[in-house]
Amino acid sequence: MKRSEDSYGTISLAYVRIDPELANTLAAIVDEGTLDAASRRLQITPSAVSQRLKTLEQQLGRILVVRTKPARLTEAGEAVVRLARQISLLEHDALAGVGIDDPDGSPRITVPLAVNADSMATWFLAPIARLSARHDIDFDLHRDDQNFTARLLESGAVMAAVTSEETPVTGCSVSPLGVLEYRAMAEREFAARWFPDGATSSALAGAPFVDFDRRDTLQHEWLRAMSVEQAGVPRHYVPASHDYALAVALGLGWGMVPVLQDSGGLVPLGGPVLRVQLYWQQWNLRSEMLDTIAAEVADEARRVLGAPSLSRPRSSAASPRPRGRAAAG
């Protein structure tokens, strides 16, 4: 039998137990990027970190970390880190439930979350700030494309995500949040220069637009709806949500601007309004802390984005969805 490249060999599950302390050490290594940095976080020596990692790998018979900078988890390592974070979350809930606090106050917990760029810039930080004021939580926010966000959930890098992905990641639950609306907008002088007769197909073929990054398809979808092929149309790349809206406002190009970011100084170009349904995915754990976070995020989404659409069956096929800033991450 061919041995896996991340395996020491075959070990019977009957003799394997994962020590939470060792699993937490692995999580610290990948969070901090190196064994030295993990040692500072754990307040032990680098050699102790190395020994814990070696012990865990020998116990499991698997290579858990690729020794690069930053350190990178193998598939087996992802499973262990996911367990470490779940144990940490449940332990926090248990300690709070029995009324045991640290001498300096309630025990703090780090909660990693993934969110799409435009949600981060428009509505997501408000509920996070309220939660931080009421609970001893250190939030670790990750921003990425929807496909990578799914990987972040699978790998255990994050506990929950705002995403445009309706189909739940394995081991996660999903619920609708609301809709982000995008309109094609331009600065007034830019619109007068490039669209004197309106946003016609011929004008759109030559007018520069602003893409968030090379995974952003919102502008392309709108152009397609306007019967314009996006290939060959001039474009700029501005990969930050606030800066993207500012670039459009300064006349760098036209772009699909979230309605929530329209300050009233831009000219609408007409055409279809693009609507992106957002969802909340989280680990399928009975955790009071995670449920509290989900409820606060859902309340803010309901207030800002409007009532979510009715959820379709989770097993239904996912429809095509935009990528880049409008997608998760």
Image (cartoon, rainbow, N blue to C red):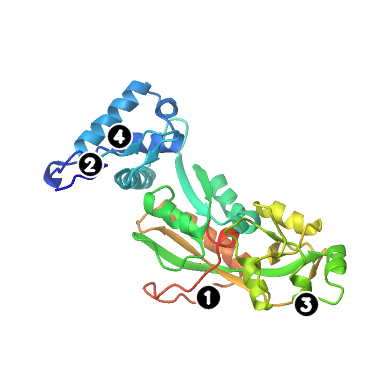
Mark 4 residue crowding within 10 angstroms, few (<14) / some (14–19) / many (20+): few
Task: Tell me which amino acid carries mark 4.
Answer: Glu
Percent from the top left, x then y, of residue 329?
53, 55
Task: Tell me which amino acid carries mark 3.
Answer: Thr
Q: Sequence order check: which comes first, mark 3 or mark 2? A: 2
Q: For the residues labelled 3 and 1, say whether their Cβ atoms are less than 8 Å apart.
A: no
Which mark's residue is nearer the viewer, 2 or 1? 2
Q: For the residues labelled 4 and 2, say whether their Cβ atoms are less than 8 Å apart.
A: no
Determine the image quadrant of residue 223. Answer: bottom right
Lateral position of residue 300 relative to residue 64, left or right = right
Q: Sequence order check: which comes first, mark 1 or mark 4? A: 4
User: Label 4 to label 2, Cα distance in Å?
Assistant: 22 Å
Label 2: element kind: loop
Q: Which residue is mark 1?
A: 309
User: Label 2 to label 1, Cα distance in Å?
Assistant: 45 Å
Which mark's residue is nearer the viewer, 4 or 2? 2
User: Label 1 to label 4, Cα distance in Å?
Assistant: 43 Å
**Which numbered marker is on residue 200?**
3
